[in-house]
Image (cartoon, grey):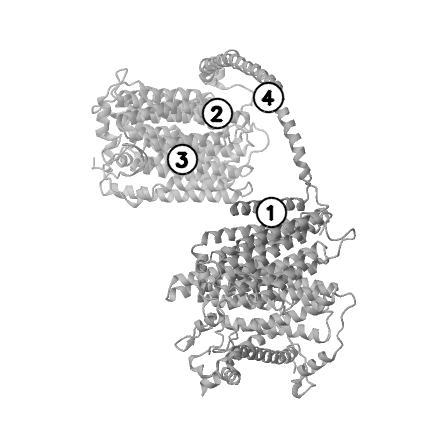
Amino acid sequence: MLEKADQLFILLRNWIVGFLPAGWQAAAGVVLGVIGIVAVFPGLFAITTVLERKGLGRMQNRIGPNRTGPFGILQPIADAIKSLTKEDIVPLNADAVVHFLAPVFLVVVVFMGFAVLPVGRNMVLVDMDASLLFYFAMGASTEVSIFMAGWSSRNKYSLLGAMRAVAQMISYEVPLLLSSVVVVMMTGSLSLVKIVEAQNQYTWGLPHWYIFTPWGCAAFVMYAIAATAETNRSPFDLPEGESELVAGYFTEYSGFKFALFFLGEYLGMLSISGLGTTLFLGGWSAPLAALNWVPSWIWFFSKVMLSIVVLIWVRGTLPRLRQDQLMNFAWKFVLPMTLLDLMVAALWRFLGDGWARWVVCSAILVIVYVAAGRAGMRGKHFGPRTYRYAE
Amino acid sequence: MSFVFWLLAAITVAGGLAAVLLKNLVHCALALTVVFAGLALLFLQLDAQFAGFAQILVYVGAVAILVVFAILLTRSSETPKDGGVFSRTWGAGLAISAAVFAVLGWVVLQSEAGLPREINVPNVTVLQIGNALMGRYVLPLEIVALLLTAALIGAVIVAMHEKGDAK
Amino acid sequence: MTGFATPLTGYLLVAALLFAIGLAGALTRRNAILVLIGIELMLNAANLNLIAFWRYLPHPEALTGMIFAIFSIAVAAAEAAVGLGLVISIHRHAHTTDLDEMNRMKG
Amino acid sequence: MFTPQIAESAASGILWLIPALPIVASGIIALFKQPMRKLSATLAIGSLSCSLLLSLFAFGHVLVGWDRGSAVRETVNFTWIQVGTAHVDLGWILDPLAAVMLVMVTFVGLLIFIYSIGYMAHDENYTRFFCFLSLFAGAMLGVVIANSLLLLFMCWELVGLTSYLLIGFWYQKPSASAAAKKAFLTTRIGDVFFLLGMVWLFAQTGTLLFYNAGMGSMEALKLGGLLATPSGLGLTAAGAIGLLIFAGAAGKSGQIPLHVWLPDAMEGPTPVSALIHAATMVAAGVYLIARVYPLMQAGAQVGGTTVALTVVTWIGATTAVFAALIAVAQNDIKRILAYSTVSQLGYMMAGLGMGGVAVGMFHLITHAFFKALLFMGAGSVIHGCHEEQDIRHMGGLKVEMLGTFIPYAIGMLALCGFPLFFSGFWSKDGILEAAQHWSVAKTPLYMLVFGALLTAFYMTRQVSYVFFGNWRGHGEPHESPSVMLMPLAILAFFAIFLGAIGTPAWPWFRAFLEGHTARFDLAGFGEPGLPALMATSSVVVLLGLVVAWWIYGNKPTRVEDPDALERAFPTIFTLLEGKFYIDELYGVTVIAFYAWWARVADWLDRRVWGGIVAGIAWLFREGAQLSRLFDLNWVDGGFDKGCEELANSGGLMSRIESGRVQMYLRLLALAVVLLTAILIWSSRG
């Protein structure tokens, strides 16, 4: 019974496919998988928006959306209707074609990223050998679309935003890649499915998630930072810093295209947290051996939503960086630290089993990270903060 | 020799033509990305997954962006006032490249008889590639790494502002 | 649906065409950056050749062509970085990217 | 005699620290900046006090050993250079001699350091002074503990260097720098002989260690070898080497004829004079002789003596009288003391020569104390009289400077050898006794007695000039700070009571040095001739005191009126005042000789060698001219032609070099086309 629950969607697909002639079944299966992805993740997107607006509201001592539906949970639907019914304005001397292609390309690419994420046991659309590489290829392609958007709308805010975004994404792609390379190195495979399976084992009922190893933990921290920057989220949200450049690269977009960009952003968030979950948090594997009976996809999605919540929390907490701080942080702190982590992982690999490697590796990492952090923060003073909570 | 191949080939070639013919350099760059993507797909079609994804990652993700940056930094996106975008001696250039294509095509067709006909199926995994890189080709790998480092530093230094140079 | 004896020919011809196009771009355009674009095209054409041969010639498990292509991709990236850096610095000095005006090296 | 114990112990193990500490301290001080006065002084004094403690520890160790009835002689040796089979060893030694010397040097040195704080207070090179001072102390201690003639020589030279630095401390004064140079060169003359002796010793015995479990050069085996080998002038090798080494010692401790540097050395700061030219460095010569005493003594029958020792004795005795005579007629307070030092050193040498190690060393120790006392007292007087050194411009200071006068008087009496109560008496008495029993001749005895008379005389003269009579100086004299007086008091104490350890009744010192038990019995005075001798010397001393007091004592004088003696016998007085014109003698003989040689060499350089060099240079110039012409007309001509050709040909090429990138690319592509075409064509055909 529980197996059935676990494999629910697979069974469903096979059942539907069963109606078709044999020749078409493979293709139909793929199509169904695509449909599933395209159906599920935008739904999550809707939930996320509500979550974010409410949560931020609480953090910023506001109520947040509360008009549409009970507690305003129907807000996303209202938003959708609004953006769909709005007039679609294209600036007069904008580069119409590119201006149109940009959001489409973005959304397409982002969706393609999901194709390789194992959302559950046997639940991956394309199980290819180099799936991680594929994922990053897709991620890299988003930059082009962002540039297209910014450049094509002939607006200095958009262009500046695009430039910032692209520069930032390129800079943070390096640590993102490196911190995942650590995992790849330790697993010995680029295939996300294999990576998850490698983590889906238990000693004393505790899982072998990579985050529970020194190098994995360090890599996860770096990955989280880089991912936040990669998705242009606060505190790295300069590209759409409202106070400086109106809305960044999609200032000139309106209506449905704007919605697409919005969608693209949040899908990017979802997919990158999905990847993080897959790489470090054991993907769809249960946190305790005892909890294996819970369907795997539930675990995956709850982990993803959890990291989303963390992202929202961070956004509500941290102030925005300056451009130069951003770049310095990327190249002078995150990158070296990931490199160090790479070496430490190698060390771990060669120290062999036993407690020694735990001590050594964590010692190195803690010492260096703390020291580097202190060095970086020298001379910067933060006064005490005062909070006032909503009654 | 499937339909897919012809489609991809058409896309790629069209992108290439666009890349060299369009007036606006940014459009050229975007067309170039199309070419890259098309090539990557061709690679995939040749079962060269790794190369294909690397192609996308490196070219679409990095080189195209780099080109775009260069275009914007050098303000070459707006078409020059005087004359067209083609150099004075474009005729000669065209003739020569035509000659090159002629020769190459002629060569290919000439040697077609000697080419292998059947595909031998490679079941090549990323693991094998990794082993090859770390084993047989480790020295070239190191050299390439050195080259990339040198290129990185060189590019930074070349593009750096000299002191007193207005930004 | 092909007139060729072997599919390899198709790949080779496409590569040749791409190469020619790139060459034409490099030869006929005035803008330095576009010359670089043309060169990139030529390089990619070469890569296509490499992969195609790797795929069709015997012993693909030796991975020669594949590895060669990967290396050439890496080298091309370096080449692009340096070339564009040069173009930018030239533009900074001569305030142009027009190759017809860049003849200071005239002998 | 007990059997010497060679075993090593903690005491000898840490012995090397004693010199090391001050040297390290000086090294650190050298890094300090000028204004870090207090710190540098603290460091120097602290390090030296540590050395003092260590020395006391070592001394105690030796004492215990001696009490248990064994003559402690512990050596720590190690190979320094290994050349094939031959190897040069270094090492240090701990035996009664070294122990006593260590304690003396560190103790007196420490007092002098403390004194310097007050004396140099106003000097801007304070830190430099302490740097040099502690370097000197370290070097001196190194000399003391050395168990290898080589190591001793190294430290010896280091001592020479530091004394040079310290004498020339006020190098802005030309006289000071001159004196420094003089001291350096004069001692160097002695050192050359020393070096010769050392090399010879090494050549003969193959080792420079003094004691090395029977294999040392000062031990019977090697000495026998040395005695066996004869050398010129009817000397054995031992004797010859001994004499050479003695030459070095004479240089350091200002024996005739190398005494000239010592009086001039008074140009240095007074603490330096006290430290170097009274207590330690000049004593180094004596100590050296004591150290190599077995060598000097080698081959002597019981009661007999050797050539070397005889020479030492004669030179010592002569120096004693000679310097004392000069001292009578000096007017510079420090010069008087300097000459008295020279003469006392003469006493020590004579003591060594006639009575053996103990006698000489005993006088060395006592003298170190009271002479340091005198010098520091003089320094305090100079300080109080506004840097005035001429005793004729002083007078009546006993009122203003009572705190200085009392210790000074004690020191003076000790130096004169005032009967019974003062250390000087006993030590000098020991020497006289030795002279009395000397087998070779009695003359030294008489000389030394006469010397004692003179000593009493000139010291009384000086004291009455300085402390009695009326104030003839300018300005008001003032007492010195207590930091300067305190050491005086301490030294004065020792100047009185140190004699107790060497009375004939209880010859502890001799027993300690020679390693047999000493017991107290008054019968010691009863030895034949001793009472008479003691009586004579007391009488002599008193006589000198009285006469001098009668001549100079406590009568008002004026600066300009001549010395009483001068009025009596002008010629002699001027002769003495001119220090027997030794310097002038050297001036017209040795130095003139060198100057003449220098002129000759100069002439050779200018005329002969210079001429040859100039000629060669001329030749080369002419040759250069020729080759230049050749270059201009042939090589350059051809080269220019070649360049023209190249330029023309380049002109052709430069047509293609349009500077257009695309031009090049085009050519490249054309080349590709052609090559491929040719290739295929040929392959098909």
Relative placement, left or right, of D35 versus D220 is right
Which comes sooner in the sequence, label 2 or label 1? 2
Q: Which residue is mark 4?
A: D635
Q: Which residue is mark 3?
A: D139
- Could you classify mark 1 by the number of other residues whose Cα lies within 10 Å: few (under 14), some (14-19), or many (20 or more)? many
Query: In the rendered structure, are the residues bearing label 4 and label 1 in contact, judged by CB atoms less than 8 Å apart?
Result: no
Q: CA distance from mark 4 to mark 3?
A: 67 Å
Q: Mark 4 belongs to which amino acid?
A: Val
Q: Which residue is mark 2?
A: D181
Quadrant of the image occupied by residue A359: bottom left
| Chain letter behind tag 1 | D
Q: CA distance from mark 4 to mark 2?
A: 59 Å
Residue plotted at (63% across, 68% down):
A232
Q: Nearer the viewer, mark 4 or mark 2?
A: 4
Q: Secondary structure at mark 4?
A: helix
- Mark 3 and mark 1, same subunit? yes
x and y percent of residue A36 in the render? 57, 80
Q: Quadrant of the N terminus of chain D?
A: top left
Q: Which residue is mark 1?
A: D673
Q: Mark 2 belongs to which amino acid?
A: Lys
